[in-house]
Image (spheres, grey):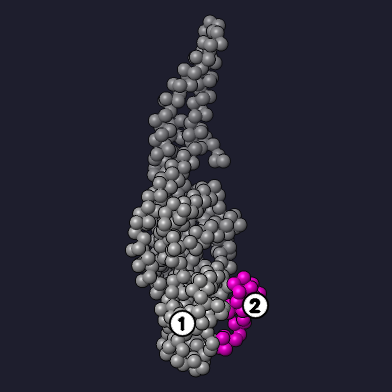
């Protein structure tokens, strides 16, 4: 049984490729059902910065290759692009990768909070799709707990920048004082809420929220003290807006070149800042060619994230130490879990032989006192425990790395493995 992760992320993969690999929240459940035809258990983590498949194959098949085949068949990326950017890890390396993701150490903005919720959401959806069993559940729950510990025990997230806050900071650099600004948020998802929160903290008081449904826009506007609008009146709203933040899950341009050109005719001297943090991108790239329009996409946050990383080197080291400790503890649990069936079978068979032989021996001996019988029973138990100690310890230490040893012991002792609980 092996844990594996196969995926692409912001470290090496440009947004033009990532957006084609992204799996929206609306499609995540159905994608998990498709994954089931490749592996029996798996979780898909898809955010603006990564699309990853975590799998455990109980049947001895190559889960990494199965995950690769799934991605190749069900996301909109050519095989040449997928091969160029994809990474694969197994066992401890895969565990460590997930823990790093949950801790915010693998994020574009080091220490950001959003990814922890995204990992939890991925597990929840996989649970609903019945794609999770005990080992996979335990690895994700352990990763989430580790992510919380890192944020509680270090300062890595203290005043941490998030994608949302960085987006507002970029707007501030262009416009200056935001207190008289109007912000238009396209998309009622969690990222949109965080952008509005960051903008309000910097003084923005005029907030307009739009979504693909009026109901979602109204709910967001009510919660954040803004005004809901329909996407049908985009040009009119753009004519009086200073900052636009797009964060929808739409698979097409929500804001096109014609929309912005028409709006800028009414405000040629006033700058318009557009922050596109959607993956796939929500804004047509040609918009950046329009005079006085400043378009930023999520990859352009990398420079800020690099500065953020340098400022947090000491906290990163502390977080790494916590992570290593938690990974080691999980690996110990994993090895014990892996070997539990054969260890149980080995001990059960040894106990059956011991008790049978002791019973036969006692029948041939003169009558013994209760104390003498107890001593003899304890002595034979001690012999069995000491005899099995080394092979059991070897199994727990090496079973994940060498399944052949487990099979050899099983055949040598003619064991029937106990089912895992």
Q: Is residue 216 magenta?
A: yes
Q: Start and end of the magenta stretch?
A: 208-237
Say whether residue 404 is left or right of residue 230. left
Residue 241 location in percent, x, y? 52, 84
The residue that disc 1 covers is 273
Q: Are marks 2 and 1 in contact (CB under 8 Å)?
A: no
Q: Is residue 3 above or below residue 6?
A: above
Residue 223 appears in which quarter of the rendering?
bottom right
Q: Secondary structure at mark 1?
A: strand
Q: Is residue 39 above or below residue 23?
A: above
148 or 403: nearer the viewer: 148
Q: Is residue 129 above or below residue 379?
A: below
Q: Is residue 25 magenta?
A: no
Residue 366 location in percent, x, y? 53, 5
Q: Is residue 25 visible?
A: yes
Label 1: few (<14), some or many (≥20) within 10 Å?
many
Residue 18 appears in which quarter of the rendering?
bottom left
Of marks 2 and 1, which one's residue comes earlier in the chain? 2
Determine which of the numbered discs, if any, sits on residue 158 in the image. none
Q: Secondary structure at mark 2?
A: helix
- Please identify, in this view, whether the residue under mark 2 or under mark 1 is nearer the observer: 1
* Residue in the image at 41% along x and 78% along y: 173
Residue 339 location in percent, x, y? 47, 39
CA gap, disc 2 to disc 1? Answer: 24 Å
Label 2: few (<14), some or many (≥20) within 10 Å?
some
* Residue in the image at 47% along x and 47% along y: 1
* Residue in the image at 46% along x and 35% along y: 410
Determine which of the numbered discs, if any, sits on residue 214 in the image. 2
* Residue in the image at 58% along x and 68% along y: 26
């Amino acid at each position: 049984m092996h844990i594996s992760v196969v995926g692409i992320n912001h470290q090496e993969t440009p947004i033009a490729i990532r957006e084609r690999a992204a799996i929206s929240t609306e499609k995540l459940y159905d994608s998990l059902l498709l994954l089931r035809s490749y592996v029996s258990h798996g979780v898909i983590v898809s955010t603006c910065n990564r699309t990853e498949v975590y799998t455990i194959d109980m049947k001895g098949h190559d889960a990494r290759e199965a995950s690769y085949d799934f991605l190749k068949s069900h996301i909109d990326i050519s095989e040449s692009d997928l091969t160029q950017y994809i990474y694969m890890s197994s066992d401890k390396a895969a565990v460590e990768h997930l823990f790093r993701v949950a801790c915010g150490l693998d994020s574009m903005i080091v220490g950001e909070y959003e990814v922890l919720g995204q990992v939890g959401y991925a597990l929840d959806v996989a649970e609903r799709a019945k794609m999770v069993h005990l080992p996979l559940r335990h690895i994700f729950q352990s990763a989430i707990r580790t992510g919380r510990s890192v944020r509680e025990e270090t300062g890595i997230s203290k005043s941490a920048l998030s994608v949302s806050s960085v987006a507002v900071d970029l707007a501030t650099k262009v416009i200056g004082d935001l207190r008289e600004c109007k912000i238009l948020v396209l998309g009622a998802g969690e990222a949109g809420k965080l952008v509005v929160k960051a903008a309000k903290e910097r003084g923005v008081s005029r907030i307009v929220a739009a979504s693909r449904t009026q109901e979602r826009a109204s709910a967001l506007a009510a919660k954040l003290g803004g005004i809901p609008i329909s996407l049908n009146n985009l040009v009119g709203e753009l004519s009086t807006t200073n900052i636009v933040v797009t964060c929808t899950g739409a698979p097409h341009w929500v804001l096109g070149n014609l929309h912005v050109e028409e709006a800028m005719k009414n405000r040629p001297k006033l700058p318009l800042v557009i922050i596109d943090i959607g993956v796939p991108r929500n804004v047509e790239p040609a918009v950046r060619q329009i005079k006085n329009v400043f378009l930023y996409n999520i990859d352009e946050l990398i420079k800020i994230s690099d500065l953020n990383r340098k400022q947090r080197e000491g906290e990163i080291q502390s977080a790494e130490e916590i992570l290593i400790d938690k990974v080691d503890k999980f690996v110990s649990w994993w090895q014990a879990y892996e070997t539990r069936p054969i260890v149980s079978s080995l001990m059960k068979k040894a106990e059956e032989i011991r008790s049978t032989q002791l019973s036969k021996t006692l029948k041939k001996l003169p009558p013994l006192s209760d104390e003498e019988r107890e001593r003899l029973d304890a002595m034979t138990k001690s012999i069995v425990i000491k005899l099995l100690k080394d092979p059991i310890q070897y199994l727990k230490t090496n079973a994940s790395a060498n399944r052949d040893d487990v099979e050899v012991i099983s055949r040598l002792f003619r064991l029937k493995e106990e089912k895992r609980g």
